[in-house]
């Protein structure tokens, strides 16, 4: 990366050790920037009363954090949205003097950072990580979906560029009036997530033999993740083979209800690091029933772990896999096809084995290193554009939308 981009600020509502796709993606980007000798500042809400910004300290001294007050997100009480705190944000940006700012979430903190950056002449690139506008219908607020989309469009059109993880997502946002949209995919650590981590001991704890099938789900246990289809798929396959087990890894508002109604489902809770990788590798079929994800980092982690993916044909599955070769893909929203796809893997063990090997091969070609380089290039381009065209870019005219895929895809 060019030496002219050496100080980057990240503004986000969520960060490690919180467990979600946004926090994971940002952690990988920050780690990559630190390895390249770039100074990084993170501005985020406090995760709890004891949080003073020490969770991400780096031995290089290149990382600093500003933690601000926050409030629980509706429907996501374990996450917090940051309050605007415009004066603190301005003082911090003036002291740090970033070459560019990446705003990963669209809450009040992100809004305050965008406004302050515009006044200071700092270019801002935003990320469209989460389809929050779709979540309202799952929490009794369906009428807010259209309003949420309008806000998201307004927010992102204030920035120099909006980064999305797939060409499919870029096309959708373009159709809805989002401007300056570019694709930046996601990577996966194929060393951490590997079939080599398969554990016979863990499978014995689950009560399964080597040739028994384990269905695995990793992610938030919540309505917007379509958990009812996970349970329906398990029950559908269990009808012809009572030894099939379902393992859920994660936490969320639906977890207690599942534990009560389905005591034979293995609910493992949140797993991290090597333990998470072991859970992945010890499964056989990975179920990804979500209809709301922008990408789904868990999909590429499952591929790297050598699991046979069953998913709707969108997001990460659409970008990286091929139906009947490296995954089983159902048309978007077609639950009957999703069930048939899972049943096909149960009935055809040779196809299951073929798909698992193909999935691993694909994942080994998806590198975080190239994604970090591409991310920095987007930030550098925004900075060059700001220098060339002045201190404030407006959205008065339609800009060309880029839907080029990541070089690593």
Image: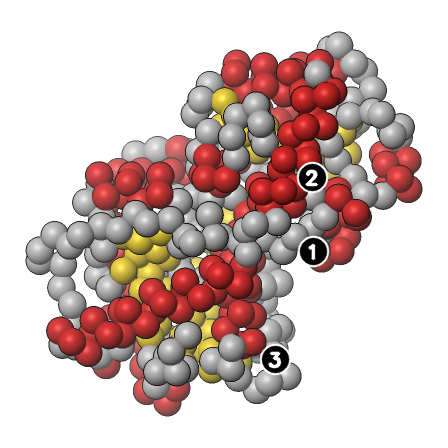
Q: Which mark is on residue 191?
A: 1
Q: Toward which corner of the image does residue 268 lie, by quadrant?
A: top right
Which is more N-terminal, label 1 or label 2?
A: 1
- Seen from the viewer's position, the closer of residues 104 and 311 is 311
Q: Which mark is on residue 257?
A: none
Residue at figure coordinates x 39%, y 83% from the top left: 3
Q: Are marks 2 and 1 in contact (CB under 8 Å)?
A: no
Q: Which mark is on residue 58?
A: 3
Q: Is residue 368 above or below residue 247?
A: below
How far, Cα to Cα, is label 3 from label 1?
22 Å
Q: Are marks 3 and 2 in contact (CB under 8 Å)?
A: no
How far, Cα to Cα, is label 2 from label 1?
12 Å
Quick one: label 1, few (<14), some, or many (20+) residues within 10 Å? few
Q: Is residue 335 left or right of residue 345?
A: left
Q: Toward which corner of the image does residue 11 lie, by quadrant?
A: bottom left
Q: Nearer the viewer, mark 3 or mark 2?
A: 2
Point out residue 201 in the picture as x, y percentages from the top left corner. Answer: 91, 42
Which is more N-terminal, label 1 or label 3?
A: 3
Point out residue 243 in the picture as x, y percentages from the top left corner. Answer: 83, 20
Quick one: label 2, few (<14), some, or many (20+) residues within 10 Å? many
Point out residue 348 in the picture as x, y percentages from the top left corner. Answer: 70, 16
How far, Cα to Cα, is label 3 from label 2?
32 Å
Callout count: 3
Dot 2: element: loop
């Amino acid at each position: 990366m060019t030496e002219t981009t050496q100080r980057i600020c990240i503004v986000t509502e969520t960060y490690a050790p919180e467990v979600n796709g946004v926090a994971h993606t940002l952690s990988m980007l920050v780690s990559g920037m630190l390895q390249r000798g770039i100074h990084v500042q993170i501005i985020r809400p406090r995760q709890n009363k004891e949080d003073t910004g020490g969770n991400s300290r780096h031995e290089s001294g290149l990382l600093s954090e500003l933690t601000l007050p926050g409030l629980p997100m509706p429907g996501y009480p374990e996450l917090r949205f940051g309050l605007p705190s415009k004066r603190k944000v301005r003082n911090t940006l003036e002291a740090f003097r970033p070459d560019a700012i990446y705003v990963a979430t669209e809450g009040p903190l992100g809004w305050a950072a965008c406004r302050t950056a515009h006044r200071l002449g700092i270019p801002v690139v935003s990320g469209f990580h989460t389809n929050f506008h779709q979540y309202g219908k799952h929490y009794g607020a369906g009428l807010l979906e259209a309003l949420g989309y309008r806000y998201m469009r307004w927010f992102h059109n204030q920035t120099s560029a909006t980064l999305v993880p797939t060409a499919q997502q870029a096309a959708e946002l373009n159709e809805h009036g989002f401007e300056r949209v570019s694709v930046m995919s996601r990577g996966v650590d194929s060393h951490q997530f590997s079939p080599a981590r398969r554990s016979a001991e863990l499978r014995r704890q689950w009560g399964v033999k080597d040739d028994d099938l384990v269905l695995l789900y990793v992610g938030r246990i919540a309505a917007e993740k379509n958990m009812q289809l996970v349970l329906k798929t398990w029950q559908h396959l269990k009808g012809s083979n009572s030894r099939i087990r379902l393992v859920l890894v994660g936490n969320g508002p639906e977890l207690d209800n599942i534990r009560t109604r389905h005591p034979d489902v293995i609910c493992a809770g949140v797993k991290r690091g090597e333990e998470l990788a072991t859970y992945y590798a010890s499964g056989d079929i990975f179920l990804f029933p979500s209809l709301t994800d922008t990408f789904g980092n868990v999909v590429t982690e499952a591929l790297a772990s050598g699991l046979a993916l069953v998913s709707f044909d969108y997001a990460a599955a659409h970008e990286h896999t091929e139906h009947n070769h490296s995954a089983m893909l159902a048309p978007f929203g077609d639950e009957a096809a999703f069930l048939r796809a899972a049943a096909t893997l149960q009935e055809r063990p040779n196809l299951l084995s073929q798909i698992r090997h193909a999935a691993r091969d694909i994942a080994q070609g998806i590198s975080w290193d190239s994604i970090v380089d591409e991310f920095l290039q987007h930030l550098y381009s925004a900075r060059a554009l700001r220098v060339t065209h002045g201190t404030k870019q407006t959205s008065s005219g339609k800009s060309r939308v880029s839907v080029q895929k990541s070089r690593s895809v």
